Amino acid sequence: MRDTFDKVKMDEGRKAEIRDVLMHRKAGITHLGIKITAAAAALLIAAPLAVYAATNGEIIDRIWGNEGKNNVDRHTINYVDEGKVDEDGNTVIVKVEMPRIEYVSTDPEAAARLIGDRISEEPVSCTIGDTRFTVEAVVRDSIGGIVASYTIEREGGVNCLNYSQLDNESKGAWYNPDNNIEFTFREGDGEIFVDLERSTDNKVYCYEYMHGYCGDHLTLQLQELTVSIQEMCDRINKDHKLDKKDFIKDEKLVTVPVADSLDSVTFTSASGDTVTASPISMKLRSTSGDLVADHSSYLVEGIELVDGIDKIKIIYNDGSEYVLFDDVTDNAAYTMEDVNGCYYALFNRLVDYDNIAKITVNDVEFMPD
């Protein structure tokens, strides 16, 4: 959730907790006790490689392949817990175990079969202030998975986004609070991966993995503020009569066309819970209670988030596996829960759902219907 809530000045420890739960959560890693947890059938049969090339294989390789991405070994970082000091007055530094991340190459024939012509590649551009946004491609499924590829350009350097390799490994890129430009897709929310290999100071390439739903288009919302994000939040926090609308200098809504949704299949557990999987995401629906035995609940701004999923694995018919995440690995592009017993995950690779033998969530097996 990219909003300005976490920029408001408050107790830094509490702010970090709320930020982690709402924005920076990636399943599979514990961070300060909170889990941190994107052609017609005839053509596909006749010439999958031609279709793959026609649908811009490079974009597919960069979003779901290993083009421009390097595998990450498990490692430890030092996290500075802002606003907290120990008994000697020293800043509290917490060691955080970062997960192993694995990327795989994209099989052109599989990509052509799984994606086909269901990718929208009609570039849509809009400039707000001195920053230009161009949405290059969008893919979505019927279960809430949306992935958008876009660029941000600004002469003198893109300054509306903070990003780094470490951000790519954890929470994704985030708004620069000292900047006055905000952007979001109205129909979805997720995590931004910045292609560091392609990006330059003046042009940043982004792949956003989102959960949400859209009809025949996405809506890119761009806002230019009269002051920086940080100043706006400081003033709203000080004077509760003020609202964000009091600081909007310019706003633009950009319609981005999308192609037809990707297909999906359903897997069911012995207790009747279901996992629906597409090539780009999965949706877990659990009402049996099997998957919340060891859950933890957090009440954040009136929203109860239940997180009881510790590991998800996809096992294919040939015996190969895709570990979405476990206690040492995080190969999910984005994960989130909602309050209706559902859990969503976007994949960091294309999943050949027709060749899945089973899916395991924690220790529960889901078999194809």
Image (cartoon, helix red, strand yellow):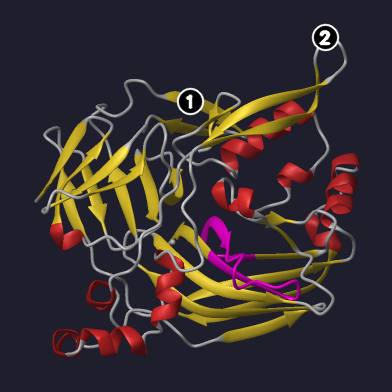
Q: Nearer the viewer, mark 1 or mark 2?
A: 2
Task: Please say whether residue 314 is visible from this viewpoint.
Answer: yes
Could you tell me residue 74's position as x and y percent?
49, 38
Q: In this view of the protein, which residue sits in the foreground, 234 or 92? A: 92
Residue 133 is one of the magenta-drawn residues: no
| Kind of residue at badge 1 | Ser
Q: Is residue 165 above or below residue 37?
A: below
Q: Residue at x 31, y 83 (%)?
A: 52
Q: Residues within 10 Å of mark 1 (few under 14, many from 20)?
A: few
Above/below status of 289 relative to 257: above
Q: Secondary structure at mark 1?
A: strand
Gap in angstroms between the C-alphas marked 1 and 2: 30 Å
Q: Quick one: SS at disc 2?
A: loop
The residue at which mark 2 appears reads as: 87
Residue 199 belongs to magenta span: yes
What residue span does the magenta drawing correspond to?
184-207
Q: Is residue 37 left or right of residue 351?
A: right
Is 9 positioned to the left or the right of 106 in the image? Answer: right
Q: Position of residue 194 (x, y in %)?
A: 60, 63
Looking at the rendered structure, the number of numbered marks drawn on it comes to: 2
**How far from the left and from the top, in percent, is residue 202?**
75, 76
* Residue 297 - label: 1
Residue 103: quarter of image: bottom left
Q: Is residue 157 left or right of residue 30?
A: right
* Residue 349, picture quadrant: bottom left
